[in-house]
Every structure is written in structure tokens, then in C-alpha cells.
Image (cartoon, helix red, strand yellow):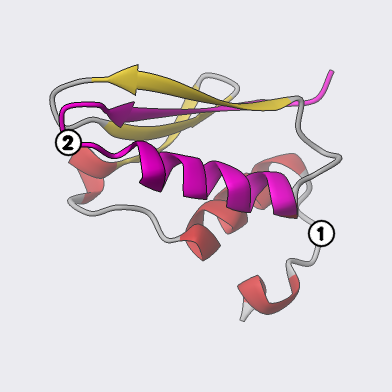
Amino acid sequence: MKPHIQITYCTQCRWLLRAAWIAQELLTTFDTDLEEVALKPGTGGIFEVRLQDELIFSRKEEGRFPESKELKQLIRDRIDPERSLGHSDR
């Protein structure tokens, strides 16, 4: 079974578009390697990205939003460490 990603975003903060953009970036990069990228509404300023239930990025812990390149590298390192991400590796 392929890995799944869950992006939890704050509905109160209106972060749906940011979450959807990140999902689009991940689905474009890992188009055949992922089972799904799910968007999960939350509250309280949450913005978290999980891979197979492992928290790989938390806005609260980092004090910022993730960069697309950064998330791609974190996911690649866990699902296919030998894979090149092209310009995202630079």
C-alpha cells in the first residue's frame, strides 16, 4: 500500500487555500507514489502535515509555515531517499 499524507489546517484562520496548494504541490511531485493527500479541517491555528500518522511538520512547533521544497524533501527522505527532486534539491 502506498503512503498517505494528511494536512490539517485551521478553518478559523482561513488556511484552506494554503493547505490545498501544498496538497497540489505534493500530488504533482509524488503523483504515482502516494495513496492520497487528505485535507482535514481543524481549529486553533493548527497547520500540520502527517505522513502515515507521523507528524513531519507543525506550524506550532516551527513557528512558521512549511516551504513546498522543504515538505517535498521530508517526504522523499521517508518514502524514497534515492529519488532526485530536481530543482527542489538545490
Residue hosting label 2:
13
Q: Residues within 10 Å of mark 1 (few under 14, many from 20)?
A: few
Quarter of the figure with residue 73: bottom right
Q: Residue at x 56, y 50 (%)?
A: 74
Q: Residues within 10 Å of mark 2 (few under 14, many from 20)?
A: few
Question: Is residue 82 rendered magenta in the image?
Answer: no
User: The residue under label 2 is which amino acid type?
Assistant: Cys
Give the residues in magenta.
1-28
Question: Element type at marker 1?
Answer: loop
Name the quarter where the C terminus is drawn.
Answer: bottom right
CA distance separating discs 2 and 1: 35 Å
In the displayed structure, 10 sits above or below 87; it is above
Q: Is residue 13 magenta?
A: yes
Q: Find disc 1 in the rendering and name its residue.
A: 83
Q: Point out residue 16 in the picture as x, y percentages from the top left corner.
A: 36, 36
Among the 4 quarters of the image, the one containing residue 19: top left
Please name whichever residue, 82 or 67, is drawn nearer the observer in this view of the structure: 67
Are the residues at dot 2 and dot 1 in contact (C-beta closer than 8 Å)? no
Given residues 11 and 78, the one toward you in this image is: 11
Identify the residue shown where x is 29% and y is 39%: 15
Determine whether, in the image, residue 89 is placed left or right of residue 1: left
Q: Please state which amino acid type lies under the numbered disc 1.
A: Arg
Q: Residue at x 82, y 58 (%)?
A: 82
**Residue ID at (76%, 33%):** 34
